[in-house]
Image (cartoon, rainbow, N blue to C red):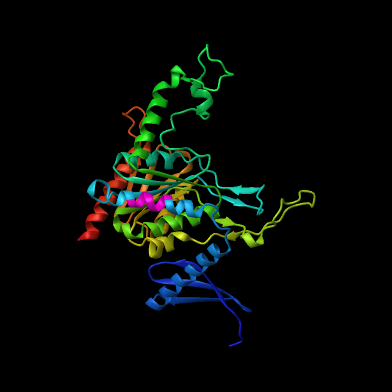
Amino acid sequence: ERGTELFPKLLKIDQDRFYLSISAPFLYKICYRIENREMSCIYELGEDEVSSFFESSPPLKNMEEIVQKLNAFIQLNSSAGGRRRRIVCVTSGGTTVPLEQRCVRYIDNFSSGNRGAASTENFVKAGYAVIFLFRRGTCQPYSRSLPDDPFLECFQFPDNTNIQATKWVFSVNASHVEAVKMAVMDQQAAVAESRLLKLPFTTIYEYLQMLQLIATALKDFGPCSMFYLAAAVSDFYVPWKSMTEHKIESGSGPLDIRLAQVPKMLSILRTNWAPKAFCISFKLETDSKILIEKATKALRKYKVHAVVANELSTRKEEVVVVSSSGNVVVRCDSEKPGSIVEDNLIRLIVDRHSTYIKEFST
C-alpha cells in the first residue's frame, strides 16, 4: 500500500510450515501453512536468486569448447554398445572466491580432491561414464598413488643420455614403475572407451556455470544420470559487479569486505535442471554431535536421494550415508590391504542407483 518493495528471505522450512523474514520499514515475521501456492512462491524466489547470480557472473572463457566436449561425450555414451550407459557427474575440489576482477587475492574452500578422484575410479570400474568436474591442481583419478610431483620424481635420465639432444629417452624410477604403469594404463583405457571426461574449474563462477551446463545437458538421460556432488563449494562470495577491477591496495589500512550468500543451486538442480537424475550430496562437519542432524536436514530441504555425512577427522576411515530409508555407516575394509572408504561407498551408491532406476521405470 505504501509502495514499499518487500524482499522475503526463506529462513526455515519443514513439512508443516515455513517462516519468512521481511525487510521493510518495520520487521515482520509471518508464518504460513504450506499450500501449493506458497510452495511455488518459494521456488520462484530461489530461481530469481539463481538467475541474478548467473546474469552478473563473468562468462566462461571457453564455453563453446566445453559444450562441444560435453555434447560429444554424452552422445557417445547414449548408444555405447547398443544401449545407454549410466553417466555420473562427480564434482571434486574446492571453489575460490575472487576479491578482484583481475584476481590476485581470493578466498579458498580447501579440498584435496582425493574423495572425488577415488570415487571416479570406482565409478568407471562399475561401468559408468564419468564427467569429472574438478578444481585445477587437485588430486586426479589414477594418480593418487603417485608422488606429489610425479613428473620430476618418477622419471629419470639414463646415465648415457645427452641432455643437449632434441630427443630424450626417460626411464621410470624403479620404486614407481608399477604405480606409473597402472596409472597410465587405467587412464588411457577410461579415455579410449569414452568413459572419462575431465572439466576443470577454479572460481565459484566457473563451477556453478559448468554444473548448470552439465545438468541441463544430462536432463534427457533421466534416471540413468547421477550427480555425486563432492566438491567443497563456497557459501559466500563477492558479487562480480561489487569488486574492484584491479588489485586491492594494501596501504589503505584494514580491509572490510561484505560477502553475499551464494544461492543454493541444489534445489534448482533437483527441480529444474535435471529433475529425474539420482542425486548425492555431501555434508562435512567438524563436530560429530551435529553431523547427522545437519545431514538429515539437508536431505529433506534439498530433496536429494542421499547425503554422505563425514566428520573432518575421520572422513578417510568412515562416512554415514543418510537417506529416507535409514542411515548406513560405511567403513574401509580393514582386512583388505590398500582398501579405501570410497570402495565400499561407491558400491553402495551404485546399488541404490540401480534400485532407483528400477523403481522409476515401474
Residue 77, placed above or below residue 238? above
- Residue at image point 43% right, 52% down: 68
Residue furthest out toward the front: 166
Q: Quadrant of residue 17?
A: bottom left
Which is the main secondary structure of the residues drawn in magenta?
helix
Inspect the magenta stretch and tell me whether residue 293 lies in it. Answer: no
Q: Give the x, y percent position of residue 33.
A: 41, 76
Residue furthest out toward the top: 160
State whether residue 212 appears in this view: yes
Whether residue 136 sits left or right of residue 88 in the image: it is: right
Which quarter of the rendering shows the C terminus?
A: bottom left
- Residue at image point 65% right, 54% down: 101
Q: Quadrant of residue 187?
A: top left
Q: Give the x, y percent position of residue 334.
A: 34, 31
Q: How many marks?
A: 0
For the residue pair 138 and 319, the one nearer the viewer reads as: 138
- Residue at image point 51% right, 27% down: 151
Residue furthest out toward the bottom: 1
- Residue at image point 38% right, 41% down: 119
Which quarter of the rendering shows the N terminus?
A: bottom right
Residue 306, placed above or below residue 49? above
Range of magenta residues: 69-75
Q: Give the x, y percent position of residue 224.
A: 29, 54
